[in-house]
Image: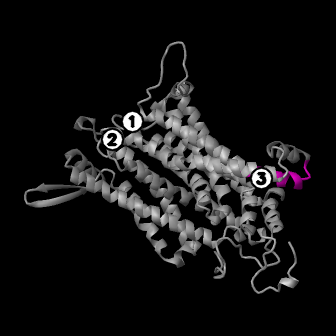
Amino acid sequence: MDTPMDPQLTANKTPLVANERSMAWVTEKVSNIVEARTPFWWWVAFCITAPIAFMGLCCIAYQISTGVGVWGENHPVGWAWDITNFVFWIGIGHAGTLISAILFLTRQKWRTSINRSAEAMTLFAVVCAGIFPGIHVGRVWMAWFLAPVPWYEGVWPNFRSPLLWDVFAVSTYFTVSVLFWYTGLVPDLATLRDRTTSRVKKFFFTLFALGWRGSNRNWRHYEMAYLILAGISTPLVLSVHSVVSFDFATSVIPGWHTTIFPPYFVAGAIFGGFAMVLTILIPARILYPQLKDLITPQHIDRMCKIILLTGSIVGYAYAMEFFVAWYGGNPYEQWLFLRNRLADPYLIGPALHITPAPYWWAYWCMISCNVISPQFFWFKKNRYNLWVVYPIIMCVNAGMWFERFVIIVTSIANDFMPSMWHLYHPSWVEIGTFVGTFGIFLSLFLLFMRFLPMIAMSEIKIVLPDADPHYVPPGTDEAHHPTH
């Protein structure tokens, strides 16, 4: 699926010969994706994802018109697929801000080829995530009660509730992410504005380019705004999913009431987010061959290393949950982890019998996908083989969903009273809504790929060797080297 990588390449150089490695080459390759005719595969993909998205919207409309009774939720499982999917999609959105903000502040040049797509993925994931709390409240038209808006009846939200903290955290995260993504787009929109011959496209590119002329003053203000937004976004990466974890950690329910949830959730969000970045960029890299020189095997290698690191942290957190349950001496906590997730040992006379826990399949899917599968990335050969990388990251995507399902459902399916024990089974409406969000996510990303530059041209040019007017490729006679 991929050719061997030239060992002479570095993370900030693209595999091009000297006379091709130029800023004009980057502009041509990226702009042609937007300017060329829509490829046939794009229409095929969109005709698949758009009906799936429509099906999800129909399920949402049916739930709103009929009521939440169409879900499979019960007592005590009041949170099920809706909150599971909310946490899942919020976690996916973390990689975009991490790549854009934190790697920018640490001056990691390899981020420049993937940050634009990762930022767009963040926005679309947060859109999908926002669907579930809205319909979970039952009356979507009353969702504005979550905002601290004064009105004549004097009803205010409970500011001590972590659910309200979610509203502020996620809305702030989405707003800053949109600003960060759009600010980075401005120079590239001006490039497309100057290249296009379509009057309609020229109008919209001119409108959203905000009068960009590439002057020294434009660049000075742009770099300052980008730096400020990166600084604001950095704490959001750590805070948003920490606040989401407070939905569980501030309760007294066994399986939720633990202090390791904030770092555990943040590591898991980065883990799943980078897997989703690779999930969408590897097919894009294959379908657009010109991107292979911009999204190189080194980018995939480094993201695989981050997945290996964060996957190891997540595996450590899984082990610590059992340790905390044992060391804390709470019988309810111990029962939950041992008998409700792992297995159910019991004695009949002198013999020990072990029966599967109610949700053993979800727990062991989580362990297999999140802890065992990333260990293959210890080997460099596997990180450079897309036939190995892609199945592993798909396992990670599935494993992160199972993690949220295990945390939420298995912790509340068996309440303190045996009379309140009830297993949860999703309804067709919940399944259709969840599948529909994948259609929404992929449809939005396909539209993004088609109409906007998915690679940050201006940032790629900054890290190219040709950004230095005196650059001479190794082994080239400076006297015969053309000036760029």
Between 294 and 211, the residue placed more toward the observer is 211
Q: Is residue 68 left or right of residue 340?
A: right
Residue at numbered disc 2: 412
| Label 2 – label 3 distance at C-alpha | 54 Å
**Residues tagged 1 and 2 counted as in contact (Cβ below 8 A):** yes
Q: Earlier in the sequence, mark 1 or mark 2?
A: 1
Disc number at residue 78?
A: 1
Residue 11 visible, this orientation: yes
**Residue 459 sits in quarter:** bottom right
Three-letter residue code for mark 1: Gly
Q: Residues within 10 Å of mark 1 (few under 14, many from 20)?
A: some
Q: Is residue 229 left or right of residue 87?
A: right
Q: Secondary structure at mark 2?
A: helix
- Residue 169: image location, x then y, percent: 52, 39
Between 390 and 108, the residue placed more toward the observer is 108
Give the answer, above or below, for where 201 lies relative to 34.
Answer: above
Q: Is residue 165 left or right of residue 352?
A: right
| Label 1 – label 2 distance at C-alpha | 8 Å
Residue drawn at x 45%, y 31% as measured from the top left: 69
Residue drawn at x 70%, y 73% as measured from the top left: 13
- Residue 305: image location, x then y, percent: 51, 68
Q: Is residue 284 left or right of residue 202?
A: left
**Which residue range is magenta in the image?**
184-198
